Image (cartoon, rainbow, N blue to C red):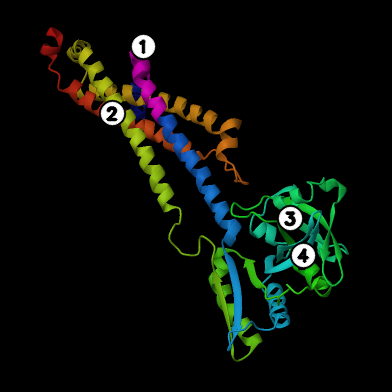
Amino acid sequence: MKGLVTAFVGSVIEAWAELRIHRTRVLLSLVGVAVAVCALTSVVALGNIAQQATIETSERSSGRPATLYVSAYTADGSAPPTATMDKTWNEALERYSVHYASRVNQQQVSIQFIDGVSPVNATLVDQPYGTMHRVEVVRGSWFGETDATRLAPALIVNDIFWQRLGSPDLATHPTVSLVGSKPVTAVITGVIAALPYEDQPSMMMLNDSYTRLAEQLATDASYPSYPSYEMWVPPSVSAELTTRLQSDFSASLGEGATAQVNRQDYAAYGDDPFLPIKLMISGVAVLVLLLGALGLVNISLVTVRQRIQEIGIRRSFGATAARVFFAVMMESVVATVAAGVVGVMLSILIVKSPWVEDVISQGVSDIPAFPLDAALLGLAAATVVGAIAGLLPALVAVRVKVIDAIRY
């Protein structure tokens, strides 16, 4: 074992010495490898950011894994009593120690703007909804734990709503009047970006705040409130909890009512939803790597043919075919590993530069760190390319006859 280690270290040192002798030629041959490794590593790293962006977009609409949705209906297709659903829901949250859960409802609220009264779509949620759906507040802050008890209810509005009010400074606690049978003054505590398809004002309000003020906010446009129910639980317990929740709600609602519990988050369907992205990234990475390897093989073959006389002299002084083979191959491996280190460093500098991060991470709240697997993949690819590029020249070097090489 000690002899093998000594031989390996000696071969590496010898290969490094040869590279220093032929450094100009080697440098030119390895530029392509360094660029290829840099491109490969950058593609994988940027792919991770693209995947994170896709995940966050999905989680904003359907929740994080695993988000369970509870719904129920009676025999005639109508919704069961909200009071019964809320009571069963609260009991289930306490029984199963669920910390992230929200009722979600839609209502229409009349708002007094500067230019008149307009109906605005209001999404009624509970405080954990912001974490469950990655709601990003661009100004102000999300609902606090005590906001449900405020006399003046808190509102989170989209930027269209905010701009229609004249873009007030949230530090001044701007208010707006909710028009109904009895007007209610509400305070705007946060602003979110309008969705791509939104062109009208919209707002979010806590369920408990709306319920407390429902009679005052009632108008001819108001309609019955039937919230949906969702909770965020660990994926490992989602299947068992689905069965238990369905049983709990069915028992609570009684005969003639049907309860359903299902998952709708991106990870609910077993198959990897990001497989197409990964395959595309892998295909581009392999193509980049093959182009780099092809250029190195061509240069390595030319280099060996120029060194045929040197190889013949070494063989005449007793160097075995195995030693010549290993020495020639190690020259390529050591060179490509060095080029791989340079390529990975360039990739890190490019991907983590502030300008690139600002461009590629738009809409991503949890920007992933530079992936270690991308750096390791780049170094591994450089090593494999060096071995492949050195294999054919090494075989050519071994097949050289001593007498012919000296005459060459």
Helix, strand or loop under label 4: strand
Q: Which residue is drawn at 79% across and 47% down?
A: 166
**Mark 3 = which residue?**
157
Kindly indicate the quadrant of the structure image that contains residue 40.
Answer: top left
Q: What residue sits 56% from the left and 61% below the top? A: 65
Dominant SS in magenta: helix
Residue 308: in sight, yes or no? yes
Compare residues 170 and 15 and report the one nearer the observer: 170
Q: Which of marks 3 and 1 is nearer the N terminus?
A: 1
Q: Is mark 1 on a helix, strand or loop?
A: helix
For label 1, the residue is: 24
Residue at horizontal 79%, vertical 51%? 165
For the C terminus, the quadrant is top left
Mark 2 crowdedness (10 Å alpha carbons): few <14, some 14-19, many ≥20: some
Eye-nearest disc, 4 or 2: 4
Q: Where is residue 24 in the image (x, y as percent from the top left)?
A: 36, 11
Q: Residue at label 2? A: 294
* Horizontal arrangement in the rendering, residue 164 relative to residue 33 (left or right): right
Along the viewing direction, whichever of 6 and 267 lies nearer the viewer: 267
Point out the frontmost of discs 4 and 1: 4
Magenta span covers which residues? Answer: 13-36
Q: Which residue lies furthest to the front in this view?
A: 115
Disc number placed over residue 110 in the picture, else none: 4
The residue type indicated by label 2 comes to Leu
User: Residue 228, percent across and down?
Assistant: 64, 72
Mark closer to the chain start, 1 or 2: 1
**First in sequence: mark 2 or mark 3?**
3
Q: In this orientation, which residue lies closer to the viewer: 232 or 57?
A: 57
Query: Residue 63: x percent and y percent?
Result: 59, 61
Which numbered disc flags the more N-terminal residue, 4 or 1?
Answer: 1
The amino acid beneath tag 4 is Ser
Q: Earlier in the sequence, mark 4 or mark 3?
A: 4
